Structures are given as structure tokens and as C-alpha cells.
Image (cartoon, helix red, strand yellow):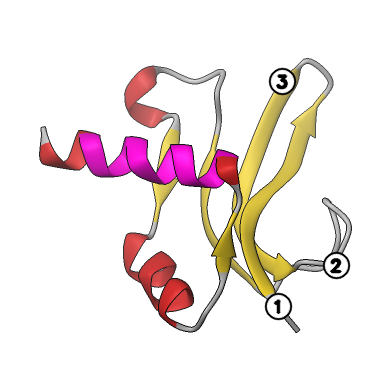
């Protein structure tokens, strides 16, 4: 099994909400997850849009999980706001 860190779509119509999760790379987008790492809610205010457990992300990356492009952008955004 190859694990992948990616987004899982949730929320209502025209009000998207995404969970950042670890899934099997062959699983469908909204399929069964291995672990939830945080969430991204693009409709909320800027400071409440992204909640992410970076320690768990680092653990999964050390275990060999790959990360999707969108999840990588969100992770970089979280790291930049933490430094500022």
C-alpha cells in the first residue's frame, strides 16, 4: 500500500470544506481514510481557513507517504504563516 496525503472533499453545495487526510493512493477521493491531519475551509476568514497538525504530517512523510500538489501548497502556506 502506498499512502498519500491529499484532500477529501466535504461540505455543502457551493460551500466546500476539505479535510487533509492520509489515504491509500488507489482509493477514491471521498473513500476510506487512514488518518485525518487537519482541514481546509476556503470560505472562512483567512486566519481560520487552515488547521493542520504538522507533527503528524512529518511522521507520515518519514514513513514514505507522498503528498499531492494541492496539499503541498497548503502545507507550505501553513509553514510560511508559522514563521511570520
Q: Nearer the viewer, mark 2 or mark 3?
A: 2
Q: Which residue is mark 2?
A: 26
**Circle 2 sits in a helix, a strand or a loop, which is it?**
loop
Q: Which residue is mark 3?
A: 15
Q: Which residue is mark 1?
A: 2
In the rendered image of this protein, does residue 41 appear above or below residue 70? above
In the rendered image of this protein, does residue 56 appear above or below residue 80? below
Depth order, front residue of 62/52 = 62
- The part of the image, by quadrant, that contains residue 1 is bottom right
**Circle 1 sits in a helix, a strand or a loop, which is it?**
loop
Separation of marks 3 and 1 at Cα, in angstroms: 31 Å
Residue appearing at x 75%, y 41% in the figure: 9
Horizontally, is 36 left or right of 55 in the view? right
Rendered-image quadrant of the C terminus: top left
Residue 68, percent across and down? 61, 50
Majority secondary structure in the magenta region: helix
**Circle 3 sits in a helix, a strand or a loop, which is it?**
strand
Give yes or no for contact between labels 2 and 1 (Cβ–Cβ under 8 Å).
yes
Residue 6, percent across and down? 64, 53
Amino acid at each position: 500500500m502506498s499512502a498519500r496525503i491529499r484532500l477529501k472533499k466535504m461540505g455543502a453545495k457551493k460551500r466546500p470544506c476539505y479535510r487533509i487526510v492520509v489515504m491509500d493512493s488507489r482509493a477514491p477521493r471521498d473513500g476510506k481514510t487512514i488518518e485525518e491531519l487537519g482541514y481546509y475551509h476556503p470560505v472562512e476568514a483567512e486566519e481560520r481557513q487552515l488547521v493542520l497538525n504538522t507533527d503528524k504530517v512529518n511522521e507520515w512523510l518519514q514513513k514514505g507517504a507522498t503528498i499531492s500538489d494541492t496539499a503541498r501548497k497548503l502545507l507550505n502556506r501553513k509553514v510560511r504563516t508559522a514563521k511570520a
